[in-house]
Image (tube, helix red, strand yellow):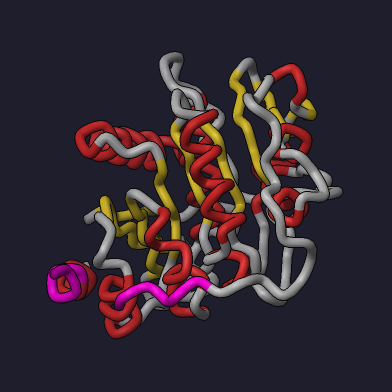
Amino acid sequence: MDQFKQAVELARGSAPLAPSAPSEGRRHDPLETPSMQPAKFRKLSLDPEYLESKRIIAFNKDDPRARSFELLRTQILQSMDRGGWQFLAVTSPTGGCGKTVTACNLALSIARLADRQVLLIDLDMRKPKVADYLGIKRSSGLLSVLQGHQSLSEAIVETELDGDRLLVLPGEPTKVSSEWMGSPAMATLLETLKREFRSRTVIIDLPPTLAGGDVLSILPQLQSILLIAEAGGSSLVQIKESMKHLKSKPVVRVVVNKITEHESAVPYYEYY
């Protein structure tokens, strides 16, 4: 993996795109609830067999495959605590690198800790997949909140598995994702999340960095980044280009996802 180390070192040290107004839905402040009441969240028990079918395994402390996520969890939380960061955004150079699988597994791994609470947000407004990976039947979510059709507390789902709880804000697809990402409504939403969930670690699943202007549009609102690359799938050029785009925020780890030959196996990771 020396080539990936070289790419990361070369890329470390563009300006974000100017935010534009969304062209679909209503534009007004979507957040009117003064505080988030857990009793108001829709509750859902997760199905462990379904999760495993989607390569989500970090909820099971007895599964040896979960150890890589425990290592990543420790490294990430140490970096976030040192930086005083609440938000961790997960992205990749291109699609297919395993960023959503990593975001879900990392969130569930953190949720196992007695002294930590987690909120997982699907901000991939091009191809939201968090709800599918976790088995959440999505009727509405992030976009409905931004449009003012639903309150934040109504959109959040409180999931539970083996006594561990994870809050999830599912995503919804839109054809004008970049405009929404840089909108005043999104900025208001993130500020509300920062205030109302200040005791929680917030994991944000972003679109791929090189897929369009979405990540650059929302980058000023973020605090720290986890970049997921795929061995054999992400080129050195793509990794370096992604790091250049993300350089205004701390990239706490670059995770190289190396899929094993065994079809049902969870990816093996190396961290830099």
Looking at the picture, how far across and down is residue 134, in whole percent? 69, 43
Comparing 49 with 141, the one in front is: 141
Residue at 73% from the left image edge and 65% from the top image edge: 173
Residue 161, visible in the rendered structure: yes
Q: Let me know if residue 16 is in the magenta part.
A: yes
Q: Is residue 227 above or below residue 81?
A: below
Q: Is residue 47 above or below residue 241?
A: above
Q: Tell me which secondary structure the magenta stretch mostly adopts.
A: loop
Left or right? Give the position of 194 relative to 128.
Answer: left
Residue at 29% from the left image edge and 85% from the top image edge: 237
Looking at the picture, how far across and down is residue 247, in whole percent? 25, 67
Residue at 83% from the left image edge and 45% from the top image edge: 137
Residue at 44% from the left image edge and 75% from the top image edge: 18
In the picture, the quarter occupied by the C terminus is bottom left
The total of numbered circles placed on residues is 0
Looking at the picture, how far across and down is residue 144, in whole percent? 77, 52
**Quadrant in the rendering for residue 236:** bottom left
Left or right? Give the position of 223 relative to 3.
Answer: right
**Quadrant in the rendering for residue 156:** top right
Comparing 3 with 173, the one in front is: 173
Looking at the picture, how far across and down is residue 178, in whole percent? 57, 73
**Quadrant in the rendering for residue 179:** bottom right
Question: Magenta residues, as a range?
Answer: 8-19
Comparing 17 with 69, the one in front is: 17
